[in-house]
Image (cartoon, rainbow, N blue to C red):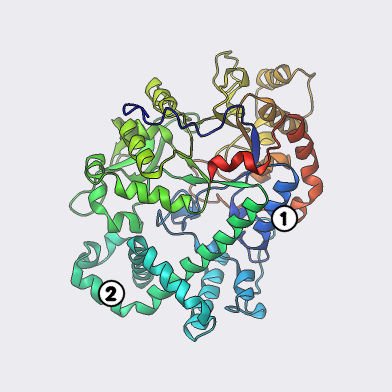
Amino acid sequence: MDDDNPAVNVPPFPLKYRSSGVLLHVTSLPSPYGIGDVGPGSFEWVDRLHEAGQGWWQALPLGPTGYGDSPYSCSSSFAGNGLLISPELLIEDGLLQADESRGSFSPVAVDYDVVIPFKHRLLAMAWRRFRAGVRKDLVPSFEEFRESQASWLEDYALYRALKVRFNGASHVEWPADLARRESGALARAQRDLASEINQVQLAQFLLNRQGKRLREYAHAKGVRLIGDLPFFVSLDSSDVWANPELFRLDERLRPRFVAGVPPDYFSATGQLWGNPVYDWKALHETGYRWCLDRLAALLAHVDVIRLDHFRAFAAAWHVPAGAPTAQAGAWVPGPGAEFFKTVLISLGRLPFIAEDLGSITPDIAVLREQFHIPGTRVLQFAFDGNPENVHLPKNYSPNTAVYTGTHDNATTREWFEGLPKREQQRLWNLVGRPEGEMRDAAPELIRLAWSSPAALAIAPFQDLLNLGREGRMNVPGLSKGNWRWCATHHMLSPHNFEWLKGLTRISDRAQPAAVMEFAS
C-alpha cells in the first residue's frame, strides 16, 4: 500500500456494483407509541425493503435529540436516542406490562411534547422493575455493557442526570465546579444521582440490545444500514462538557466561533448553526482519538456512514460568536487527508458516503477522490439548464450515491410543483417524454436515479409514496415544526413497493446479499 495515499486500493464500492435503497428515519415508522422505534415496525420495514429488492436502508442520525428535536443536534455522539426504544420489546422482556404502555397519539405526525414524557415514564418503569430483580439474567450483560462503554457512558449518564437536576439547563449554566468538571463535585454528583445515572445507563443498554437484534435481522434479509454522522456536535452535549479541550471555547466554556455555511441555495444570508468548532490542533495531538471512537461507535450499529457536511474536512465556515448571520464568517482549514489516513489505519477501511453538497471547491473533490469515497448527487439540483451540472446523470462517475432529494429538500412532487415552467420542461426533456402531470415527476426522478451510472440510488420514502408538501421532513433555517413526519401502517402495504421492485430489477440494482459483504 502506498504510504502517501494509503486508501488507493480500498474502493468502498466494488467494480460494476449497482444497488438501491430508501431513506426513512426510524422516528417516521408507524407505531402505536407516537414515534417510530427499533421494534416491530422496523422489522416490517426491513421486510418491505427485502421484498422490493432493496439493499439499503438509510436513516438520519440516531443520537439523543436536543434543540428543536433535530437529529442533527444531539446531546451525545455516542449514545442512542432513548425515544427509539421499543415498548413492545420491553413488554416481551417483562420490563413493562401492556396496560402500562397505552397512550393517545397523532397518527400522522410525531408530537414530541407528548411522546417525550410518555417514553420517559415507560423507561422509568422499566428501570424500577429491573432494579427490583425482574430479568436478573440480563444483569451480567448489563454490567459488561457498562464496562465496555465506560469511556463515554459514565459521562453521558451523569450529564443527563445533571440536566434533569438543573431543569434542562446547558452545562455552561451549571454551578462552576460542575461545569468545569472538578473532581470533588463530580464525585458528589455521582453519589447523589446514582439511581438516575443507572437508569440512563440501562436505557442505553436496552437500546443497544434492541438495535443489534434489528441489525442482525436486516442482514439476514440482505439489507444493509446507512447511518448519518453530523460533522459538528451541539454545545449542549456531553461531548463538549466532557472534552472542552477539543473545541475552540473561551474561559467561560462558550464558543469563540460557531459553525455555519455562507449564503447558499437554502438561505440568502447563509445558515448559522451555532455549533462549537473543533480545535484541530488539539485533536491532532491525540491522534484524533475522540473522532475515531465516534466513528467506531456508529459503525457498531450501521454498515456505512454518510459523512454530513463533508466539505468541512477540507475547510469549514467559522462565524464569530455573536454574529447575527452567517455572512460574517470565513473558511478555516479542516484536518484534510491526514485525518482519513489515520481513520484507515485505525479502522482498516473507509465505509463512507460523502455529503459533498453546497459550496464545493476543487480541493474537496480532490480529497474525496484521493480516498475513493463516493460523492452525493441530488436530482432536484440538476435542472438549471447547465449541461455541465454535476447533478445531471450523464456527468456521474459510478462511485456515486444519487438521491432524488434529501431530508432537507421538499418532496419531489412539492419541488416540481414550485418550478418555473421552463425548468419543469427540462425534466420532461431529460426523461424523453411529452409533458406529464405533476404526479408524474417523482416516479420519473426515481427512474432517472435508478437508471443512472451511480453505484447506489436512493429515494426518500415520501417520494416513493408520491407525497407533496405534507411529506416534508425538514425546512432548513426553520427552528420549529421539523422532523415530525411519520408514515401510516397503510403506507407500508406491500402494494406500495411493487413498482419499486420492478424498477429495481429492470435497472439491475437487485443485488444479492453476498455482493454487499464489503460493507460489513
Residue 492 on image: x %, y %: 74, 52
- Depth check: give the residue in front, 320 or 32: 32
In terms of sequence position, does the residue under pointer 1 or pointer 2 come before the other? 2
**Above or below for 46 versus 279:** below
For residue 398, the mark is none
Q: Residue at left 51%, top 51%? A: 480
Give the image quarter of residue 157.
Answer: bottom left
**Above or below for 72 versus 216:** above
Residue 244 on image: x %, y %: 25, 53
Q: Do the residues labelled 1 and 2 touch (CB within 8 Å)?
A: no
Amino acid type shown at disc 2: Ala
Q: Residue at left 22%, top 72%? A: 185
**Above or below for 162 versus 491:** below
Distance between mark 1 and mark 2 Cα atoms: 43 Å
From the image, tell me which residue sits under label 1. Answer: 488
Residue 450 on image: x %, y %: 68, 30
Residue 305 visible in the displayed image: yes
